[in-house]
Amino acid sequence: MTGAKKQPLLVLIGPTAVGKTALSLNLAKAWNAEIISGDSMQVYRGMDIGTAKIKEDEREGVPHHLIDIREPEEAYSAADFQAEAERAIAEIASQGKLPFIVGGTGLYIESLCYRYQFAENGSDDAFRAEQEAFAAGHGAAALHQKLARIDPKAADRLHPNDIRRVIRALEVHHLTGQTFSEQQEGQKKESPYDLLIIGLTMDRAELYRRIERRIDLMLEEGLVAEVEELMKRGLPSHAVPMQALGYKEIVRYLNGECSYEAAVELLKRDTRRFAKRQLSWFRHMKDIRWIDMGENFHNNLQAIHGIIAGKFQDHLEYTSNQSF
């Protein structure tokens, strides 16, 4: 309907370990919001520690959506996320609450914010099997290099261990002759929502220190046992849990391919690289209001509440009596 008001949508993005979870709870309670996870791995049951999934008793009464909605054996795509997040947004809005996306998976969040049209390119099972066999025989890095040769932009955005999406990008080119990047760049970058994206950043050295502390804590909480449980399910090497950050490295240790110390160092290195890729993705997006989390937290919080108030000031239902 022409002239209809767009649905307000609050989005909080940033690299891993920057502080999204704690801040999201504060904002959700202050603005009568419900959180929709924008993390591609937190959809899977049994992948809790390695994905830094917020525990039920830590949610402070704030409803969370799109967490623990798939088994590790099941596929989950950006198109799946877009469809399910749109349903969650509509459901939350129907209750007079503010839909609030929180996460770090750039493709998922961007596809939702700007309602990407996912081309019906079809699939080629034989081609996929061929690429999976290539990855198994030559390694994820070699598969990633194949993508880098035909679509360097997509390769720069996709982690080499993300075999499923690397294969999908190769498959798009195989089926259409068009690169995955060309398809994404052709998308209309106008949001169907009254959109506010807040991006969190901090000094790179401090971010890396936080990443290392988080990984040490994950290991103390039982990450190795969590990976062992997934391995007992008999998942193939190309399955999501076996290739996910925080899992692939521990699998190598459990398979006797490297020492525990080497696996931990590899995990820390890979996570630092992942954070760098996340920031690279987000910096290609538009409409982001960046906040440096390395400075005074109280001042940052005041600034963020001010930004939200300025954007959604006409929507009184989103305010609360909480003192900021």
Image (cartoon, rainbow, N blue to C red):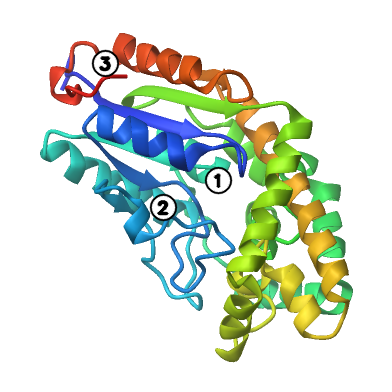
Image position of 9 (left or right of 240): left
Up-down: is 160 above or below 61? below
Q: Which residue is drawn at 49% across and 48% down?
A: 119
**In terms of sequence position, does the residue under pointer 2 or pointer 3 come before the other?**
2
Q: How crowded is mark 1: few (under 14 residues within 10 Å), some or many (20 or more)?
A: many
Q: Name the residue under label 1.
A: 105
Q: x and y percent of residue 306 in the render?
A: 37, 11
Q: Examine the image and state in which quarter residue 50 appears.
A: bottom right
Quadrant the N terminus occupies:
top left
Q: Do the residues labelled 1 and 2 touch (CB within 8 Å)?
A: yes
Depth check, front residue: 105 or 49? 49
Q: x and y percent of residue 178 in the render?
A: 67, 45
Q: Mark 3 points at which residue?
A: 312
**In terms of sequence position, does the residue under pointer 1 or pointer 3 come before the other?**
1
Q: Distance between the residues labelled 1 and 2?
A: 11 Å
SS for dot 3: helix
Q: Examine the image and state in which quarter residue 221 appears.
A: bottom right
**In terms of sequence position, does the residue under pointer 1 or pointer 2 come before the other?**
2
Quadrant the C terminus occupies:
top left
Q: Examine the image and state in which quarter residue 322 appears.
A: top left
Q: What residue type is labelled 3?
A: Phe
SS for dot 1: loop
Residue 81 is tagged as 2
Q: Distance between the residues labelled 2 and 3?
A: 25 Å
Q: Residues within 10 Å of mark 3 (few under 14, many from 20)?
A: many
